[in-house]
Amino acid sequence: MLSIENLHAHYGLSHVLQGVSLQAGPGEVVGLFGRNGVGKTTILKSIAGWVPASSGTIRFGGVDLAGQTPDTIARLGLGLVPEDRRIFPGLSVEENLRLGLRQCPGRPRRENEQAIGQAFARFPRLAERRRQLGTTLSGGEQQMLAMARVMVGTAKLLLIDEPTEGLAPMIVDEIFAIITELKRAGLTILLVEQNIHRALDVADRFYTVERGRITLHGEAASSADRARLMEMVAV
């Protein structure tokens, strides 16, 4: 589903990603862990086309993403849920949600309405607040809206960046329940998350990032790999 080989990326003169290679198979949840500022978010943004790769390859479903614009990449079935959620001010919950339909131009209106209905069924809190301004929602509800907005399109791969940051424990439970449901539905997910223990419970595999490089690749079900991961992130 996703294959990255020797990816390099820069912010100006700052060499942020220094030869990242990773893979995510169909239906897998892959965790991406590491301390703040090591390049995890840049990996997601490079995949989505928000940050251009300096060199290396990113292939999604066999398609080379090099040089593709973010809107083209989104229409291929790749959805980014950014850390800052990017809820549009002045638009209602439903209007924010309908912006996600731009990922699939030409899709019949009936299918679009079905997608909106399915999103509201999956996120009943959003259905209750469909006419409320999106920016007046709680942090957890805004996170749900950001995820739902991507899912009304044709996403096969979700890139989710820090979905539970700053949320109450009860809302964290809801977010991870949604991620588990998406996994059961067969979506591939690349998940950046500081709550490592919760993320490992839903992940199949994981990578750790340090100074723009992958330093560990392990199986979430392996107690030995988990122990090595916790040693690395605790340093």
Image (tube, rainbow, N blue to C red):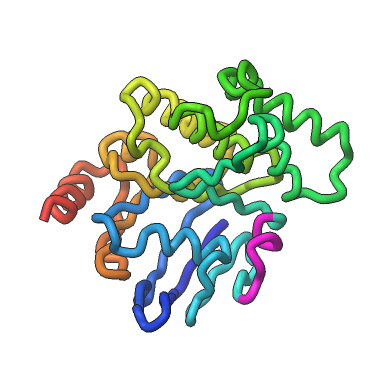
Asked if residue 72 lies in the magenta stretch, the reply is yes
Residue drawn where x is 48% and y is 81% of the image: 54
Q: Where, by quadrant of the figure, is residue 186 drawn?
A: top right
Task: Please tell me which residue is depicted at 83% across the width and 34% down the height of the picture.
Answer: 111
Left or right: 94 as drawn, with respect to 162:
right
Residue 128 in percent (x, y) is at 62, 16
- Say whether residue 28 is visible: no
Question: Is 217 placed above or below 81 here?
Answer: below
Q: Quarter-wise, where is residue 135 in the image?
A: top right
Instruction: Give me the residue at 29% from left, 44% from top.
Output: 194
Q: Position of residue 103 (x, y in %)?
A: 72, 50
Which residues, given as a range, are shown in magenta?
67-74
Q: Where residue 223 appears, x then y in whole percent?
A: 20, 42
Q: Nearer the viewer, residue 187 or 163?
A: 163
Q: Position of residue 72 (x, y in %)?
A: 70, 62
47 shown above or below 12: above
> 53 or 128, which is in the foreground?
128
The furthest residue to the front: 90
Rendered-image quadrant of the C terminus:
bottom left
User: Which sits in the foreground, 48 or 5?
Assistant: 48
Q: Is residue 88 left or right of residue 234?
A: right
Give 60 or 26, whichever is nearer the viewer: 60
Q: Is residue 91 magenta?
A: no
Residue visible at 60% across and 75% down in the picture? 66
Q: Main secondary structure of the magenta part?
A: helix
